């Protein structure tokens, strides 16, 4: 079972080995990114099979980053995917992946088949550049940048570029303050929030292994850039310059690449444009070698394509949606707390105000569960009378689900439950395309265990509370 912890700024260092070795070319997998945008994304993290799993809460839904193995071990990443699937199934969460690298998209498509929704929001994509292009600005395609660099060097012969030192802190803060006053005039919440995070990031430059370069004219800092080595790329987290110093930006970018993008650093990741038109134009003018896709992938389960409950006819029974006129019998079934202690759910947990709810309340709850695609509750009818319920629930992402049945007391002991379970599992295999149907029963409930065996289920394990069963199309 995965155990997620809140990713606080003070424990980001725990993730540094994963970020430093990553080869995804995604800026999200970096200490600087997680530090600066931690508040907005509210991430959690966990480890599974040697892989890091990040999880974000966005608009009430959890999004799981594709697992990150520091060595790029696909087998470990796939094992972590299995753990994520199990976690979502056990906690009734819909599975949403985010930050999926292009190189892993095919693996997910094969894993989930056609039942998957894929999106690639343009504003999230990172801009990736060849480091050598920034070091030299070669050829006609970079003539504009070279002209700006030459103009800066000519206009400010007393310029200097050097690596940040702790004794530069006061001067760097003065530069950022001057830069921030200009940013405030833009009245951009995102820009102001970024400046706040830049200030907070500075004390962690050494701890995170970041590289910071300063551009000075005389004794004054007129530009600063902060980057982080991640695999074969340098992620540029901060790049600020005073625009009145013409050419400062292209010159700062070039000198930073020359100073810090040496052997083994083949690429510069200058992050996304956040949907800002001006920023997008600027990033494109530097001629990226790749605009790095970051995919969202939403796998669909078998239940997601079911628009209405089935009607299944067996030798003695009809399985179908519970009708309004059978509400009182359904309430008697659902409110039987003595028998439902084996069912694994007590209606009183969701009841406000106490007392026995109406038949309409129970029916509405069951129908809402199906509407939300949490389960498929089907009434068991014999001779036109409602005698119980059979349910497919806990749908997973590997073509599996769990089945359970319950009967009104006067109909127990006649084989109705096993007949209903057998019919429901056949429907699951033939109509829903499932590969496995599971079941469990309390160890004290011997009648239920015998019923499941009679329905063709095989026992496959036990713990202190339950016996576990399964059935496949071949068994």
Image: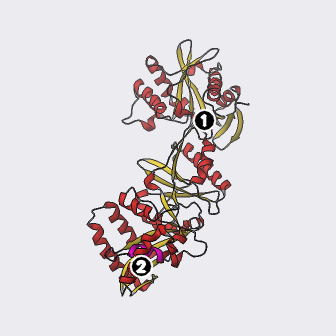
Q: Residues within 10 Å of mark 1 (few under 14, many from 20)?
A: many
For residue 310, what is the image quadrant?
top right
Seen at 39% across and 31% down, the residue is 355
Q: Is residue 248 left or right of residue 320?
A: left
Residue 312 visible somewhere in the drawing = yes
In the displayed orientation, state which residue is furthest to the front. 140
Which residue occupies the extreme left position in the image? 185
Q: Is residue 279 above or below residue 356?
A: below
* Residue that label 1 marks: 401
The mark lying in front, picked from 2 and 1, is 2
**Image marks 2 and 1: residues in contact by CB distance under 8 Å:** no
The residue drawn where x is 45% and y is 73% is 253
Label 2: how many residues lie within 10 Å, few (<14), some (14-19) or many (20+)?
A: some
Could you tell me residue 190's position as x and y percent? 34, 61
Residue 165 x, y percent position in the rendering: 45, 84
Tell me which segment is drawn in magenta: 242-254
* N-term-proximal mark, 2 vs 1: 2
Residue 222 painted magenta:
no
| Residue 275 x %, y % | 39, 55
Image side of residue 274 versus residue 292, left or right:
left
User: Quick one: quadrant of the C terminus?
Assistant: top right
Residues 76 and 130: in front is: 130
Residue 211 showing in the rendered view? no
**Horizontal and vertical percent for residue 308?**
50, 25
Residue occupied by mark 2: 150
């Amino acid at each position: 079972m995965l155990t997620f912890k809140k990713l606080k700024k003070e424990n980001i260092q725990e993730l540094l080995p994963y970020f430093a070795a990553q080869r995804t070319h995604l800026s999200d997998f970096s200490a600087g990114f997680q530090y600066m945008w931690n508040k907005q994304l509210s991430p959690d993290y966990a480890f599974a099979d040697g892989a890091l799993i990040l999880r974000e809460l966005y608009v009430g839904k959890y999004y799981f980053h594709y697992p990150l193995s520091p060595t790029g071990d696909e087998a470990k990443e796939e094992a972590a995917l299995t753990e994520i699937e199990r976690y979502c199934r056990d906690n009734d969460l819909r599975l949403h992946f985010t930050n999926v690298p292009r190189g892993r998209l095919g693996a997910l498509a094969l894993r989930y088949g056609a039942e998957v929704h894929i999106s690639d929001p343009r504003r999230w994509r990172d801009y990736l550049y060849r480091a050598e292009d920034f070091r030299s600005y070669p050829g006609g395609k970079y003539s504009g940048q070279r002209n700006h660099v030459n103009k800066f060097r000519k206009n400010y012969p007393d310029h200097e570029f050097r690596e940040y030192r702790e004794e530069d802190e006061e001067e760097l803060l003065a530069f950022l303050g001057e830069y921030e006053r200009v940013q405030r005039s833009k009245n951009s919440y995102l820009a102001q929030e970024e400046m706040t995070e830049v200030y907070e990031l500075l004390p962690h430059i050494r701890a995170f292994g970041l590289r910071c370069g300063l551009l000075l004219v005389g004794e004054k800092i007129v530009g600063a850039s902060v980057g982080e080595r991640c695999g074969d790329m340098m992620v540029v987290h901060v790049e600020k310059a005073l625009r009145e110093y013409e050419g400062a930006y292209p010159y700062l970018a070039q000198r930073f690449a020359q100073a810090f993008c040496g052997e083994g650093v083949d690429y510069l990741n200058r992050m996304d444009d956040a949907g800002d038109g001006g920023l997008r134009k600027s990033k494109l003018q530097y001629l990226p070698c790749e605009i790095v896709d970051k995919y969202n992938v939403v796998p669909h389960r078998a239940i997601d394509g079911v628009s209405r409950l089935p009607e299944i006819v067996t030798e003695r029974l009809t399985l179908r949606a519970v009708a309004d006129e059978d509400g009182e019998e359904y309430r008697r079934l659902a409110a039987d707390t003595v028998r439902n202690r084996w069912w694994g759910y007590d209606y009183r947990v969701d009841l406000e105000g106490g007392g026995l709810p109406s038949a309409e309340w129970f029916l509405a709850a069951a129908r809402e569960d199906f509407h939300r695609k949490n389960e498929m509750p089907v009434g068991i009818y014999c001779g036109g009378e409602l005698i119980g319920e059979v349910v497919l629930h806990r749908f997973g992402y590997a073509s599996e689900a769990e089945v359970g049945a319950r009967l009104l007391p006067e109909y127990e002991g006649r084989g109705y439950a096993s007949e209903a379970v057998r019919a429901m599992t056949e429907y699951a295999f033939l109509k829903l395309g499932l590969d496995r149907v599971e079941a469990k029963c309390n160890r004290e409930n011997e009648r239920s265990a015998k019923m499941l065996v009679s329905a063709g289920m095989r026992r496959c394990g036990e713990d202190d509370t339950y016996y576990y069963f399964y059935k496949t199309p071949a068994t």
